[in-house]
């Protein structure tokens, strides 16, 4: 396994790689991340994994400082998975002129809805880092998780804006047995909080099976009440149109919609989603 911390040697090394399947991460790796790597391997793409906690995408500096870091274990696991290339850059490598006042991307309404609305600047930060990483790595494919549903849409848009030929491969959300979506942030939950947090997915599943035209408002209200009883402070739980993420009051007849949710369990912000 080749671990690079600077750009030039990485680029030189990658000249020999035909099928690059890029897996960008912020580390504290778990089965969700590994599933992306395994998917790339399955498709016979060489997984290139980056680990970088990107300051530009944190609208809350405390969240940035508290973000878990388990580099030694991450590298051990990546080695076991036979990942050929890991990129572990320092901030100055990617942002030599600092990470304030960077270029802006025209993301349209995606930027003002749901995660965009609740985390101002977040998706600009995501685009700023990914555009740099894409430029360095020049992947043929990018593997990302459906867990971050809106992020996947933003990245699709970014690839268009960059006129990139890279293909985005969206992989299913990996969950704990309880249904809780695996996330690096789960490390910051106590066992009690973890079991309470599983109610998020339970409610999404319940809504998925029970929602029909006419009962949306009532069922969403009941779900939010159940989540709050179980310790969540919800930011949103909504139905949205799948392709545009336009919030919907009514479930469309073709069910081309997705449930999107974000809420706080203690001081940990969790998100989840479920296509309807
Ligand atoms: P992160 O390190 O949280 O930035 O995530 C890196 C990549 O892993 C993103 O594409 C995420 O969507 C993906 N990911 C995170 N958690 C999961 C999960 N539970 N299942 C599938 N993919 C995930």
Image (tube, rainbow, N blue to C red):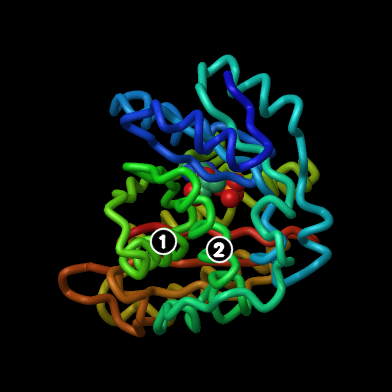
Q: Is mark 2 within 8 Å of ligand 1?
A: no
Q: Is residue 7 above or below residue 12?
A: below
Q: Quadrant of the N terminus?
A: top right
Q: Is residue 31 above or below residue 143?
A: above
**In the shown orientation, is residue 215 left or right of residue 113?**
left
Residue 148: x and y in percent read 48, 57
Residue 15: x and y in percent read 41, 32
Question: Which residue in the structure is indicated by mark 2?
Answer: 126
Disc 2 packing (10 Å; few <14; some 14–19; many ≥20): some
Q: Earlier in the sequence, mark 2 or mark 1?
A: 2
Residue 233: x and y in percent read 70, 70
In front of the other: 191 or 15 = 15
Q: Marks 2 and 1, how far apart in space? A: 8 Å
Secondary structure found at label 1: helix
**In the shown orientation, is residue 35 left or right of residue 26?**
left
Disc 1 packing (10 Å; few <14; some 14–19; many ≥20): many
Mark 2 vs 1: CB contact within 8 A:
yes
Quarter assignment of residue 19: top left
Looking at the image, the residue that sits furthest to the left is 254
Tell me, for residue 155, which label it has, or none.
1
In front of the other: 206 or 103 = 103
Residue 182: x and y in percent read 58, 42
Tell me if residue 72 can be seen: yes
Residue at 80%, 67% (x, y): give it.
61
């Amino acid at each position: 396994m080749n671990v690079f911390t600077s750009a030039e040697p990485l680029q030189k090394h990658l000249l020999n790689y035909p099928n690059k399947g890029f897996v960008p991460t912020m580390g504290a790796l778990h089965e969700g991340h590994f599933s992306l790597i395994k998917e790339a391997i399955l498709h016979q793409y060489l997984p290139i994994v980056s680990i970088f906690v990107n300051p530009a995408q944190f609208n809350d500096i405390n969240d940035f400082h508290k973000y878990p870091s388990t580099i030694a274990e991450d590298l051990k696991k990546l080695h076991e998975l036979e990942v050929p290339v890991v990129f572990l850059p320092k901030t100055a490598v990617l942002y030599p002129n600092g990470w304030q006042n960077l270029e802006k991307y025209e993301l349209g309404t995606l930027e003002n809805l749901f995660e965009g609305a609740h985390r101002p600047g977040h998706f600009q930060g995501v685009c700023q880092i990914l555009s740099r990483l894409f430029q360095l790595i020049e992947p043929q494919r990018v593997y990302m998780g459906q867990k971050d549903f809106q992020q996947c849409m933003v990245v699709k848009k970014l690839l268009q804006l960059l006129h990139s030929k890279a293909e985005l491969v969206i992989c299913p959300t990996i969950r704990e047995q309880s249904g809780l979506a695996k996330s690096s942030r789960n490390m910051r939950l106590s066992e009690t909080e973890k079991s309470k947090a599983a109610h998020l997915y339970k409610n999404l599943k319940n809504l998925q099976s029970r929602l029909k035209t006419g009962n949306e408002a009532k069922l969403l209200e009941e779900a939010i009440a159940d989540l709050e009883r179980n310790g969540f402070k919800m930011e949103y739980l909504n139905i949205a149109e799948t392709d545009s993420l336009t919030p919907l009051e009514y479930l469309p007849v073709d069910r081309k919609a997705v449930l999107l949710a974000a809420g706080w369990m203690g001081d940990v912000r969790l998100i989840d989603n479920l296509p309807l």
